Amino acid sequence: MTINFTTIQWVGGINGHVEMIDQTLLPNEARMIAVRDEQAMWQAIKTLQVRGAPAIGVAAAYGVVLGLQTIPDQAPTEEALAQLDRVREYLATSRPTAVNLFWALNRMAGTARDTHASDAGQLKSRLLTEANTIRDEDAAMCRAIGRYGWQLIPENAGVLTHCNAGGLATAEYGTALALMYTAKEQGRSFHVFADETRPLLQGARLTAWELAQAGIDVTLICDNMAGLLMRQGKIHLVVTGADRIAANGDAANKIGTYSVAVLAHAHNIPFYIAAPTSTFDLATPSGDQIPIEERHPDEITKPFGASIAPAGIGVFNPAFDVTPHHRITAIITEKGIIQNPDEIRIRDFFKTNN
Ligand code: MRU
């Protein structure tokens, strides 16, 4: 199935720039914006013009390339490497939860170290190739996740998803939504319920838009309606993405995911996570150690500009929560499915699939 929008891409040669769809404007406007330096990339990540764990990873990789453009091609490699360290540290401060950001920055740094470039120009061009590879691999991983997972959607199923784990959240095609795109390709009939996903409405603005574009039947619901639909027997499985999966399988995802997982358990409905292996953080033992981003109170008190709460009211605005592994039926990756994920199964999976 072809997706008719471009989430993020590099345009031109080594002195080129990044183009991305500005996700803060969707669904009212599908505008492509140009990002030309690392400050603009930091801002784009922070303000969610680009968002979703894998897409943030791609954005960070391109951000490194942008950050090196001010170094002349003839400059010594060491000068470019020192600049790379500064840019890497800077971009790492944009958002803390999605591990793909750090994964991509580390991969770029590793490539830079291994390149033994003769000058800055050679290093920069090697890094652009690497960033493009990260983007292309991400697109391929999403397709593979779809191939592994689509049969988990039974004929005539009702599928609930939360936030946006679609093409907008990745280089292309998505993770949770990849199951749906592939199932549709395979001729399967099903119906998607999209949680609107308070406070920033990624479900309403992005998932509903994306699925409708692809001709997939989708009904938008408020987050607090999921329990009713489950009780009415309209939901047969839940599938979401993840921002970081700890070594024991605990998974951080958009705030509200944990509540959906608990509801699914209470109604005996499978709860799946679809994520590439770049979303696993095996150095973090459990979900308790995953850093959870807290965002500005205005996102809750003044959503999209309109004031809906008393001025000065206290607000708690965590952007993510953690679903414990014992509430996850399976994790679908680009290398296969991990059933009943726990520390041992995840360790074995990575041993076998390295
Ligand atoms: O704050 P966001 O919009 O970046 O949060 C995104 C999510 O929580 C997604 O579900 C997650 O990144 C998986 S994307 C394939």
Image: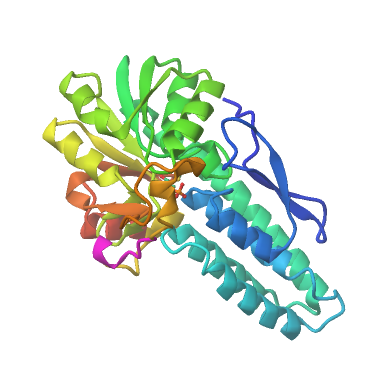
Q: Magenta segment: does it hold 292?
A: yes
Please give left or right for residue 9 compared with residue 52 in the image. Answer: right
In the displayed structure, 177 sits above or below 249; it is: above
Q: Position of residue 8 (x, y in %)?
A: 65, 46
Tell me which residue sits at (56%, 56%) in the image.
45
Tell me which residue sits at (49%, 25%) in the image.
211
In the displayed structure, 112 sits above or below 43; it is: below
Q: Position of residue 332 (x, y in %)?
A: 36, 42
Q: Is residue 15 visible in the rendered structure shown here?
A: yes
Q: Position of residue 230 (x, y in %)?
A: 20, 25
Please give left or right for residue 154 compared with residue 11 in the image. Answer: left
The quadrant the C terminus occupies is bottom left
Camera-nearest residue between 116 and 216: 216
For the magenta stretch, what is the residue range? 287-293
Please say which color scheme the image uses. rainbow
Q: Is residue 154 visible in the rendered structure shown here?
A: no
Camera-nearest residue between 210 and 318: 318
Q: Magenta segment: does it hold 229?
A: no
Determine which quarter of the picture holds residue 23: top right
Q: Position of residue 167 (x, y in %)?
A: 54, 37
Camera-nearest residue between 37 and 318: 318
